[in-house]
Every structure is written in structure tokens, then in C-alpha cells.
Amino acid sequence: MITPLILGFAVILISLIVGGVAVTSAQVARMQLYDVSDAAALDAADAIDSGAYTGGVGDTVPIASRTVAQTAAAYVARTERPREMISWTIAPGTGSPDGRTAVVRMSCQARLPLVGGLISALGGSVTVHAESRARAGLDLTP
């Protein structure tokens, strides 16, 4: 015979397991999004903007916000999205604040296993954000 105490402990244990799986899934989605935003930022940092050479070459590759956004969008478009992610997008703020650093901001909607049905009234997913920065330095030694 199952006592109310054992039943209560079982419900708490199952809730902790399901919650742990959901939190772990959100963290994995976040790390996957960081991987893509890091790679897009590195790709964008190497995208030289011809209009940026007006002042000469300094110690970094000159880039422009428009070039960073276009390069990052092209990189994300050719990258396969993990199946846990419903969608992903380049977020506002992607660009180059100083003409030397590529900043890529991304967001995605990630599915949460086991609890997706429970939170379907809230959309069944969680929004994850990532921001990465990269700068391509130049070695000017002969």
C-alpha cells in the first residue's frame, strides 16, 4: 500500500528530474547558440570592408557594421540549426561599434523536453540569447 508520504516524495522526485532535464536542455541550447554566434563573429571579423581603408591599415582588420551583419547572416543561413531549436535569428545590435570589433547578437527559440507540453500555454519554448565579439589582428612584422 502506497502511503501519502511515499507518493508525495515520488512527486517531488519526478518534478526535480523533469525540471533538471528542462534546465539542462536550455543550457545546451544556449551553448549551441554561443557556438554559432562565436563562429559568425569570427567570420565577420575577417570580412574586410573596402570603404574602411580610407584611413590606412592599423593593427586590426577594418570592418563596418553593414559588413558584419551581412557576413553573420550569411554564416547563420548556411549553418544547420540543431533540432532542439525551433528558430534562430540575428538580433539587433549586430555590427561593429568601433570599426575593429565584430559583435554578433543572436536569439533562438528552444524546445524543452518533457515540460514543453506543460508550458504550451506560454508557447512551449524558451528564448535564449547570445552575444559574441571577435577582432582580427594584423601581424605587420616583416
Image (cartoon, helix red, strand yellow):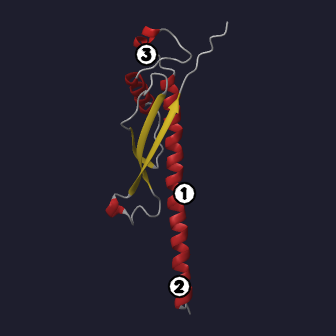
Q: Answer yes or no: do the residues labelled 3 and 1 have beta carbons within 8 Å? A: no
* Residue ID for mark 1: 24
Q: Nearer the viewer, residue 74 or 61?
A: 61
Q: Residue at x 55, y 91 (%)?
A: 3
Q: Is residue 127 left or right of residue 19?
A: left
Q: Is residue 92 above or below residue 123?
A: above
Q: Answer yes or no: do the residues labelled 2 and 1 have beta carbons within 8 Å? A: no
Q: Is residue 123 above or below residue 9?
A: above
Return the disc, 3 or 2, that comes first in the chain's sequence.
2
What amino acid is found at the position of numbered circle 2 in the picture? Leu
Position of the N terminus, as image quadrant, is bottom right
Image depth: mark 3 or mark 2 in front: 3
Q: Residue at x 50, y 60 (%)?
A: 22
* Residue ID for mark 2: 7
- Residue 127 is situated, as x and y percent measured from the top left of the image, at 40, 51
- Residue 112 is situated, as x and y percent measured from the top left of the image, at 45, 57
The numbered disc on residue 45 is none
Q: Is residue 125 above or below residue 136?
A: below
What amino acid is found at the position of numbered circle 1 in the picture? Thr
Q: Residue at x 43, y 25 (%)?
A: 68
Q: Residue at x 54, y 57 (%)?
A: 24
* Residue ID for mark 3: 49
- Residue 105 is situated, as x and y percent measured from the top left of the image, at 43, 37
SS class of the residue under badge 2? helix
Determine crowd level at label 1: few under 14, some 14-19, many 20+ residues with C-alpha closer than 10 A. some
- Residue 29 is situated, as x and y percent measured from the top left of the image, at 50, 49
